[in-house]
Amino acid sequence: MLLLHGWSVPGQAFTGQAALAQRGYRVIAPDHAGHGLSVRWRPAAGGTIAGLADGVAGLIDALALRDAIVVGWSMGAMVAWELARGRPRQWLESRVAAIGAIDMTPRLLTAPDWPHGLHGGYTAAQAEQMAAQVRRHWHGMVPLVGAGLWADGVEPPAHEAARVREWMAGCDAGVLAELWLDMARQDYRQTLREATLPLFCLYGERSRLYRPALAAAMAALQPAPRVATIPAAGHSPHLERPQDFNEALLRMIGG
C-alpha cells in the first residue's frame, strides 16, 4: 500500500495507517519533494505534479513493487492520477492494482461545467495570490492552512494540531508555491473517465475544503469508482479518524 501525502503535510500524516501492516499490507508513505525528509530535494523542473509522479514511479521501480494499492490524499491524489495519465499502460498495470483518492477534486479551479473546485468556487487569480502569499509569509499562514484539515465545527486535540503545524512549518515554501500553481493547472476528469485500473474515493463528511456534492460528481465521471464517506471527518479522515478510515479503506480494496 503506497500512501501519497497532500500539500504541505508529509508522509507522517499516515502514521495511523501503520496498523494496516497487521492486515497483511506492506505500508509505504514517502515524502514528496519539499516535504518532510525530502525537504532539501528540489527537482530540476521545479515543483510540479508530473515531477512528483516521476519520483513515485522511480520509487515503485526501485522497490520492485507489484500489485500496489496507490492511495493519494489531496495533492497526493493528483500525483496518483498523474501516474495513470503519464505512464505507459503496460508499466502501470504491471505495477499498480488500484488507485484511491482521499478528499480531492480532479480540478482545483471552478468552471461552468465543474462547480466542485476548492471551496466550491476557486479561480486562477486566487491560486496566483495564494502562491505569492506562501512564498512571502508561509510560516504566518501555517495556522490557517492547518485549520482547514479538520472537520468543520470541530476543534482538534491541541497536541494533534500542534504536530500538524510543526510538519507544515518544516516544508520548503518555494516548492509549496510551485506545487500550488501546478495543482491549479490540472484537470484529471478525462483521466478518470478513461481509467482502466480500479478507482475508489474516500471523502470526509464535514470537509472544509470540498462540498458533499463532490463525491457524487466523482462517481458520475465513471460508473466503476467506489465512493465512501467517513462520518464526522474533514479533509484528512485518515488523520482525524484513523480506525474508521482504515476500515473504510479495507472495504474499498475488498470491493
Image (cartoon, rainbow, N blue to C red):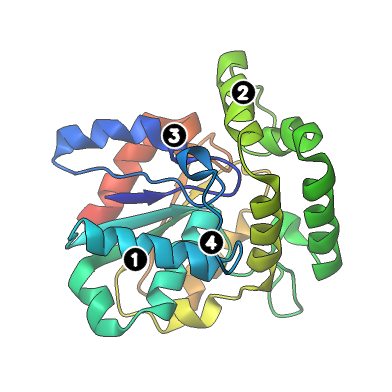
Q: Position of residue 206 (x, y in %)?
A: 61, 41
Residue closer to the observer: 57 or 106? 57
Earlier in the chain: of badge 4 and badge 3, it is: 3
Q: 43 above or below 197?
A: above
Q: Position of residue 73 (x, y in %)?
A: 48, 51
- Residue under pointer 4: 43
Q: Residue at x 53, y 61 (%)?
A: 43
* Snapshot quadrant of residue 61: bottom left
Pair 1/4: label in front: 4
Secondary structure type for disc 3? helix
Whether residue 208 appears in this view of the structure is yes
Q: Residues within 10 Å of mark 3 (few under 14, many from 20)?
A: some
Secondary structure type for disc 2? helix
Earlier in the chain: of badge 1 and badge 4, it is: 4
**Circle number at residue 57:** 1
- Give the number of marks: 4
- Residue under pointer 3: 12
Whether residue 179 sits left or right of residue 246 in the image: it is right
Pair 4/3: label in front: 4
**Circle number at residue 161:** 2
* Snapshot quadrant of residue 83: bottom left
Pair 1/2: label in front: 1
Q: Position of residue 80 (x, y in %)?
A: 42, 64
Q: Residues within 10 Å of mark 4 (few under 14, many from 20)?
A: some
* Amino acid bearing label 3: Gln
Earlier in the chain: of badge 1 and badge 2, it is: 1
Secondary structure type for disc 1? helix
Q: Residue at x 74, y 54 (%)?
A: 119
Q: Residues within 10 Å of mark 1 (few under 14, many from 20)?
A: some
* Amino acid bearing label 1: Ala
* Amino acid bearing label 2: Ala
